[in-house]
Image (cartoon, rainbow, N blue to C red):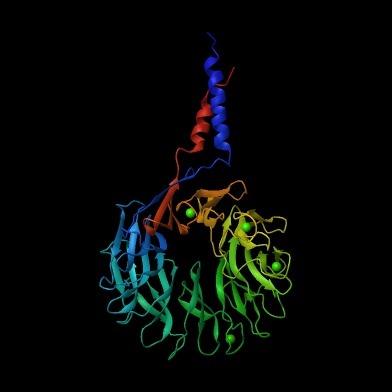
């Protein structure tokens, strides 16, 4: 008997298996992820159209419209998906929970109370633990809810002070006006952004116009960061983006008709300056700041290039055009585009005038700025410009169309060969239009449409068994003699 008969058969078999599993191009539908409809909440083809997907307490919280739009939660199973509370049960509109914001172990949101109107709510995740936080007996129309530590800051109106900055710790007593920055009128705080224990925002005290302000949670102080557009005109700052210990934003210093340029601040007036005057005769209007490691990518406009990709290390010298992706004066990037940091690179949607809007990546150099894959071959677009891919288990996920399957779930590992459709959820050319990708632990939630259930919550988990299990088994085999 040939003692090598079994190994001779087994080694090539396992070798072939390993070879197939290691091939990135092997990806039949649904091999990568197990995808399921969490629940058809409306029970018909209408769809509950979930929104504001927010991880909290290891579960997903969201709003859904079953009999009016109310707060729901899910653990990814149908049995574990339920309405948290019906705040406005007799209204076909529902309470429309919005601005879901986690601070510490509490979930804050705004919702329309039947008596008080738009109000602040706080929840521990349970029905009994979900309570309204009235503002001087009014709802107060809270907006821009933003966590700083275990509290939230927001804009509200108590009926006397106008639209001003408020804070809440989740108790009625701890829900207070921070300061009436503009007595008798609205300072209208907007664009709230936390940076450590500081809060940056835009407000108008009636003297300076709309300028950047900073609240310091260490001492409760609130101060004008800088009157960037000197005098009554405002610099109208926005796009506050934390970058290490500093913050980047977009502001207009008022020189010329408009001069929107990138600004950077350490939170002190002396440490607040224009980062670079990219377009001196106008404004480059920098948008879509995205931190990638120790740099920030953004888009900026110049007459020579149009809106293109820029990068900064936080210094004027280190702020430069990455690439004029379409090589001409038209825009390759849109003002409302989505961006994500992945694999120490920027991933975004760009249009090079040849391939339509497609997924691109950049390492910050012109040579290292390239299309990931022409998903919809030729000049047709594969992705909407505002698509924001989300990272899950070492890959990016997003909605895209190849021109035949409709807008469906795609994934990339950053390489062309590793970019493929995960599943044609609504089989054929109809769009399932997956969006609002939200990671909760080992689950990837998203909203998608099907003919039978309408637009509902879906969940994906990694398919098993992992290829590494086979690899380990193969490596455990005795070496061939
Ligand atoms: Ca001003
Ligand atoms: Ca261009
Ligand atoms: Ca294309
Ligand atoms: Ca389809």
Residue at coordinates 61% horizontally, 84% vertically from top-left? 229
Q: Can residue 172 be seen here?
A: no
129, 75: nearer the viewer? 75
Number of on-image labels: 0
The percent coordinates of residue 395 (x first, y second) are 54, 50
Quadrant, the C terminus: top right
Q: Nearer the viewer, residue 24 or 288?
A: 24
| Percent of width and height locating residue 263 | 62, 74
Q: 360 or 126: which is nearer to us?
A: 360
Question: Which image quarter: residue 332?
Answer: bottom right
Where residue 112 sits, quadrant-wise, is bottom left
Q: Residue at x 68, y 60 (%)?
A: 354
Residue farthest to the top, as pictured:
1
Is 120 positioned to the left or the right of 357 in the image? left
Q: Is residue 409 visible?
A: yes
- Residue 25 image point, x, y percent: 58, 42
Give left or right: position of 323 versus 218: right
Q: Residue at x 50, y 55 (%)?
A: 429
Horizontal placement of 356 versus 305: left or right?
Answer: left
Quadrant assignment for ligand 1:
bottom right
Q: Is residue 269 above or below residue 308?
A: below
Q: Is 180 drawn above or below residue 67 in the view shown? A: below
Q: Position of residue 181 (x, y in %)?
A: 46, 85
């Amino acid at each position: 008997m040939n003692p090598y008969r079994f190994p001779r058969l087994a080694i090539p078999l396992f070798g072939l298996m390993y070879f197939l599993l290691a091939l990135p191009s092997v990806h039949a539908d649904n091999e990568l992820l197990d995808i399921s409809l969490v629940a058809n909440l409306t029970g018909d083809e209408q769809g509950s159209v979930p929104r504001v997907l927010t991880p909290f307490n290891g579960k997903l919280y969201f709003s859904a419209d079953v009999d009016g739009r109310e707060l729901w939660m899910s653990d990814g199973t149908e049995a574990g998906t339920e309405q948290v509370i019906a705040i406005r049960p007799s209204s076909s509109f529902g309470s429309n929970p919005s601005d879901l914001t986690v601070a510490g172990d509490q979930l804050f949101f705004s919702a329309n109370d039947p008596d008080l109107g738009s109000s602040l709510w706080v929840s521990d995740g349970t029905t009994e633990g979900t309570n309204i936080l009235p503002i001087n007996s009014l709802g107060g129309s809270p907006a821009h809810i933003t966590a700083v530590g275990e509290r939230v800051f927001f804009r509200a109106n108590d009926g006397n002070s106008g639209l001003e900055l408020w804070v809440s710790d989740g108790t009625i007593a701890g829900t207070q006006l921070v300061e009436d920055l503009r007595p008798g009128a609205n300072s209208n705080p907007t664009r709230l952004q936390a940076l450590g224990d500081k809060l940056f925002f835009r407000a108008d005290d009636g003297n300076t116009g709309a300028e950047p302000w900073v609240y310091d949670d260490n001492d409760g102080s609130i101060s004008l960061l800088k009157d960037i557009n000197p005098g009554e005109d405002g610099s109208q700052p926005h796009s506050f983006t934390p970058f290490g210990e500093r913050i980047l934003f977009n502001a207009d210093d008022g020189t010329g008709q408009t001069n929107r340029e990138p600004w950077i601040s350490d939170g002190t007036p002396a440490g607040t300056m224009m980062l670079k005057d990219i377009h001196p005769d106008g404004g480059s209007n920098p948008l879509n700041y995205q931190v990638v490691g120790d740099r920030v990518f953004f888009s900026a406009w110049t007459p020579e290039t149009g809106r293109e990709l820029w990068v900064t290390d936080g210094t004027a010298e280190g702020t430069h055009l990455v690439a004029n992706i379409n090589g001409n004066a038209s825009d390759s990037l849109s003002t409302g585009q989505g961006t994500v940091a992945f694999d120490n690179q920027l991933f975004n949607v760009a249009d090079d005038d040849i391939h339509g809007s497609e997924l691109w990546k950049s390492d910050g150099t012109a040579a290292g700025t390239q299309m990931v894959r022409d998903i919809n071959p030729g000049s047709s677009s594969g992705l909407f410009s505002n698509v924001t891919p989300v990272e899950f288990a070492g890959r990016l996920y997003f909605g895209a169309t190849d021109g035949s399957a409709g807008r469906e779930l795609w994934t990339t590992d950053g390489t062309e060969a590793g970019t493929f459709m995960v599943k044609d959820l609504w089989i054929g050319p109809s769009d399932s239009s997956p969006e609002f990708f939200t990671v909760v632990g080992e689950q990837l939630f998203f909203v998608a449409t099907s003919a039978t259930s309408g637009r509902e919550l879906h969940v994906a988990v990694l398919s098993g068994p992992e290829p590494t299990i086979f690899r380990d088994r193969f490596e455990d085999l005795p070496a061939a003699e």
